[in-house]
Each structure stands twice: as C-alpha cells, then as structure tokens.
Amino acid sequence: MDVNYIYPEFEIIRNMDRCISCRLCEKQCANEAHLFDAERKIMISDETKCVNCQRCVSFCPTRALKIVKSDCTLKENANWQNDTIREIYKQANSGGVLLSSMGTPKPLPVYWDRILLNASQVTNPPIDPLREPMETKVFLGKKPDSINRDKTGKIICTLPPQIELSMPLMFSAMSYGSISYNAHESLARAASKLGILYNTGEGGLHEDFYKYGANTIVQVASGRFGVHEDYLSSGAAIEIKMGQGAKPGIGGHLPGAKIVGDVSKTRMIPEGSDAISPAPHHDIYSIEDLRQLVFSLKEATQYKKPVIVKVAAVHNIAAIASGIARSGADIIAIDGYRGGTGAAPTRIRDNVGIPIELALAAVDSRLREEGIRNNVSLVVGGSIRSAADVVKAIALGADSCYIATAALLALGCHLCRTCQSGKCNWGIATQRADLVKRLNPDIGAKRLFNLMTAWQHEIKEIMGGMGINSIEALRGNRLMLRGVGLTSKELEILGIAHAGE
Amino acid sequence: MIINAENIKYDDLNTAIRNAKGNIELLNVCGQRFIASGMQDKRIIINGIPGNALGAYLNGGKINVKGNAQDAVGDTMNAGEIIIHGNIGDAAGYAMRGGSIFVKGNAGYRTGIHMKAYKEKVPLIVIGGTAGSFLGEYQAGGVIVVFGLNKKYKKIVSNFPGTGMHGGKMILRSNCKDIIFPKQVSVNPATTEELEEIKKIAEKYCDFFDEDINIIMNSPFTIITPNSNNPYKQLYVTN
C-alpha cells in the first residue's frame, strides 16, 4: 500500500432508489466529485475530490444525496489524532507548508459563550423595543476632549471626520480576488441599504463599485494594490492593514493564477503576476512611522476621511493599541485569532494570536487607564457570530464589530474551508465566471440585509431587556456582563464579575 | 507663485500649495512632510530640504527639489515627475506604479521596494550615485536605474538587491562582479537594444543635472530581471 495514502475524509452517500441520474450534481460540482457512468447509466462518485461544501446536497431534486464524515479511521489515539497524522503524510509527500482557509476549527475557548448578559427585573424596568424608540446608531472616529465656543458663544465645530453607522456592525475586509465580483456587489449593495460600511480589502476597488463609496472602507496594505488618489478619495474611510487575526505576522499572497481579467485591472498589476503583500510594511518600524503613513493618507485626502489601523490580536495588544491611539489614527480595528480568511498557513491560523474577547477587554481598559479612550473608536472582529456576541462586545468596550464569516454564510458559504482552491461552488471565493454567476447579487444583498436587520432587532431586544435604550449607554458597561466557569485571572482580564457575584 | 515655507506647518503648507495657481516655488523648506501628497498637475520647485513622504500618492505634475530629500519620496506614486538635485533617504518610490523619480546623488535603503507596473504605467527611478541595501526588494514591475557616479570606494548597490523580485527590471552601471544577487534573479550584461534604452534615460538624467552622457555610457551595464513572476508557487500544500 502507498505510504502516503489518505482515505477520503468524506463519503458521498447516494440513495440509488431516489437518484434519477439527472446529472445536476455533476454540473454543480466544480471539484468533479460526481461522474456519470454512461455504460451503466448511473451516477458514480469520486470521494477524493469532495470538500463537503453541500452544493450537490442542496440542489439534488430528489434528496438522494448526503455527505457524511467517513468512519474509515486510523486506530484511535488521543495524542496522534487522525488530522495530525494526515497532515504529516501531506507534508512528507509534498514538502509544502500546510495551507488552510477560514477560521480555526480547533476547540479553543470561545469566551463569548462563557459570558452572560444581564436583564432588568422590578426596578429599572425593561423597555419594549416594539413600543419605544431604541437607538443603535453609532459614530466612529476621534472624539474631542472639550467643546470650544467663539466670542458669541457659538460652538466652534472642528469635529474630526466620523463614520455614521445605523447599527454597530460592518462587513470586514475581503479583497476582490479572494472573493468574487458578485460577492463584493452583494456586500456593497447591502451596506448601502443598511447604512453601514463594507471593506474592499487590499485588492483595490472595482470601477463599478465607486458609486457605493459612501459605504466603503478602502484598505491600504503593504502591497498597496490598486491604491491611488481616486481610490483613497472615493471611500468613507481608509484602513491601514497591519495584520489580520487568522494569520498575525503573515502577509497576503494571491497566486498569479487568480490575477486575471478585472482582478488584475482592479489591483493594477499585470495578469498572471503574483500579488505579494509582505507581512511588514517596509516603511513602518515604529509608532512614529505608522503616524507618518496615517498622516500621509490624511494629507492626501485633506483630513476628510477617518483612518482605521487594523491589527491582529496578539500578546501585547494593549500596548500596541495604546501606541496606535497616539499615532493619529481615528479608529483601531482588532481582529481576534478565530478570524477567517481566504488562505492562511494552518500552523499560523491555529496557533498564533489571542482571542478577541481578552484583547478587547485589555485594550479598552488600557486606553481608559491612560485617558486616551476617546482618541479612537474600537472595532472588533474575529468571529462575531450573532447579535449576542455583538452586544457582549459592545459591553466589553467596543464601538462596533466587524463581521465577515457570518456575511459569507449569509451569501451561501457552507464553511468547507477550501477557499484557497478557487473552486467555490457557491460563487463566493472564486473567479471562475461559471461559478461566480451562481451568486446572484440581488439575492445576496437581500440575504445580507435580512441578516443584519434581524441582528439589529435582536440587539434592540437584548438592550431593552437590560433597560438600556441607546447603544452608546451600553458601550464599556461591563456591569451588564457576568462570567460562568471562568478562572479569577480570566475574569480579571475581562473586567467582569462571576455569575452570582 | 512664491511661498515662503519658513515656520509653516506641513498641513498649512499643503493648503497653500493646493490653492496656488501656476508654477509654484517654495522657499526655506525645512523638513515639512507630505509635500504635494495626493496632488496632481502642480509644478513645484522646492528650495531647502523637504521632509518625509514628499509626493506620496502623487498623481501627476512635477516636483523639482534643489537639494536633498528625506525618506519615502514618491510613496505609492501613480504619475508625475520628481527630480532631486541631491541625495534621498530610505524607501523612495515604495509601491510606485507610475511616473518617474530622478535623483542626482545617492539613495538610501529599499529604493523602489514593491515597485509595480500596469499596462501603460511603467514607473522609473534613476539614481545618479549609489543605492543602499535591498534595492528593488519585492519589485514587481517598472525600471530602476543606478549609475554609480562618483562612487569612489563604495559598491554601486549595497547588500541584497532584488530580494523577492518578481517583475520589472534593474539596470546597474557596473559589471557587478562585487555584488551578490539572490537566486530568484537573472543577471546579464546589457544588450545593444537595452543600451539604447539606457541611453535615452541617461540623456534625460544629463538634461536635468548637467552631466556628461559620454561618461555615463562609457561603462558596462548589468540588467537584473526576475526568473519568475510566481516565486512562491511551490511553497504550499492544501490542507
């Protein structure tokens, strides 16, 4: 037997009583896991190609298909688990760095699930959001320390630029190239309709989407792809990407094979050339250098755009954020280690960084201690999964949340975690025209709109329960949170009491 | 229009430049950063020493510096021309996509890092003197020329030129016997055709800085190009 042999991870179960050999599964599968046996006139499967994206299952008109995890396993071993052994085979076979997609699937603690929310009883009664106005609007940006008036007593308004959001949520950075044109269009249209923002990522802004500029964050990363004067001026804010949660300390790398057509045009690099975005910005070695990039962008856009600095949540995040808050940046975005991505080295994704909950609490506390919390707004991402996570993040000190995986799920992603293949059957993480058109931007935008409106209702409901009618009054209100099953150290860092206290 | 930049902060100076009509001459510039950042169609003469990020995101026009300049000249520049009658600091032309930068003297580290090209946009950096380490690091397009004039005992370019290079071209006025290049680039003497191209660039340089074209052309030239535009293709295995 071949020493490298890896038994397929999934089995395609086809109920032959139901299968009508319509070949729809074959057409839907870009991985070519379904084949038609012309001689026997039946459908057959090649499990080695299946990524368990559930596309065929969803489209099978007779529900003849299901994908199950194979029960063919190696001898059980708590130390040397199946996945670990498979990874060793893959590397021994290829000599390659393991490359994965989306957030880490490892069972590391999710602190959101260990934090519980408060509700009003008897005194300070709850508020019914269906009956009374509830404010979920937030403004992101630097807030002034004092109000200045002229001689006649009129307020001198020199407010730094602000982003207005109808709810404390934004779609976080996913580049055109890593995701499709239709995915970007869905995000842009939904953001416009919702009164929130989406983020171009570092792949530039497609010319068709300049019209959504008021709802767009344009990103500047170390590779500076597609960055030029019009691009900077077209967005509502500029984000400098220093790092991302799924791969802190690692740069971006879009292979030349994906730099085709409009992706090449939007990134402003030739077709077929690798798009390499190195881990560091080679002109930034200090907070002073960061300040220089922040202000060069502000100068180029005449101080009309807030500048966001995005960093991954890492060990010294509080000190890093304190530096950024003094760099002239208006907003700090922190991405936790459960964050998703189109492609990241497996070892980095699963082992580097810290959870967003702890990072957020540490940063908010530190900035308050130093009296500079109002210098910046805080945006957090890295696996915000529900309205409850959003409310908990706000109460821990965030001004707004970034979501990406949840948005992709709304667009049809089934988290098969093979974005790097470029063969996304749901038309999201692909540039193949026949696959891209599977994602209808009308439907995509509608589904994103639905998801966000549903979350907004839930946020209002939870706030109402706490007797709070404005999201601003919830921010940093850690008295609304209690921990369950957490150690004293964890509670200390989160700055919350244990349930029952 | 003449603007005296003495004791003026960079943001006020840029506002004055934005509002100025016609040719602009700045006097007594002393370290003001971000001059002409993101501007286009301005013709500016700078007397004194501009600070970091001169002409960042520049989108056209012409900047002529009658002296030295500091770090990050022409960062992410898209179009236009910057002429420096002196030396420049580090990371000039970072991710530059179009236009040209001519430097009479020497350049610091990381000149032309991440330089790109796209269709008709082929950026050009010309260094009259020598260049520091990491010249053309991650270069993805465009042309970097170093003449090494008056280099005396120095090497024309310091350590690690072309690390991570995956596009574009570097032209060094030397046989480069004393330079160590990374594995991913090809190093060849200039062909007759390339010498013609170099001559055109040299003529422009001589025009700006009043140098002798014959002296410049009377030397071997080495061309550095990447072996592949997909340097990291074989690095990964899908997990």
Image (cartoon, coloured by chain):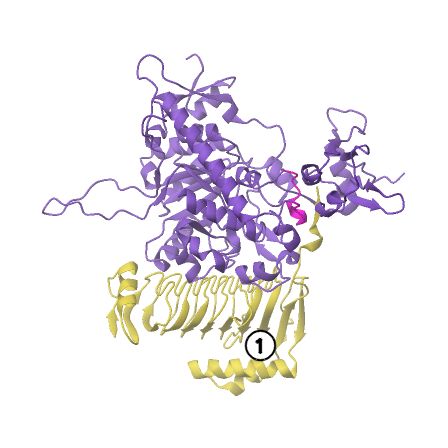
Specify whether residue A34 is in view. yes
Residue A211, quarter of the rendered image: bottom left
Q: Residue at x 56, y 26 (%)?
A: A109
How many other residues sit within 10 Å of disc 1, few (<14), some (14-19) or many (≥20)?
many
Farthest residue to the left: give it. Answer: A152
Q: Residue at x 39, y 65 (%)?
A: B55
Q: Is residue B227 left or right of residue B140?
A: right
Question: As displayed, is residue A489 above or below residue A49?
Answer: above
Q: Which chain is purple?
A: A
Specify whether residue B138 is in view. no
Q: Residue A476: percent from the left, percent from the top?
A: 37, 29
Question: As displayed, is residue A414 above or below residue B151?
Answer: above
Query: Which chain does the residue under circle 1 lie in?
Result: B
Read off the magenta span. A415-425
Which residue type carries mark 1? Arg
Residue A271, quarter of the rendered image: bottom right
User: Is A419 included in the stretch rendered in magenta?
Assistant: yes
Residue B33, quarter of the rendered image: bottom left
Q: Residue A325: percent from the left, percent from the top?
A: 37, 42
Question: As displayed, is residue A151 above or below residue A82?
Answer: below
Q: Residue A335: percent from the left, percent from the top?
A: 50, 39
> Could you tell me which quadrant the N terminus of chain A lies in?
top right
> Could you tell me which quadrant the C terminus of chain A lies in?
top left
- SS at mark 1 in the image: loop
Q: Main secondary structure of the magenta part?
A: loop
| Residue marked by disc 1 | B173
User: Is A40 included in the stretch rendered in magenta?
Assistant: no
Q: Which chain is yellow?
A: B
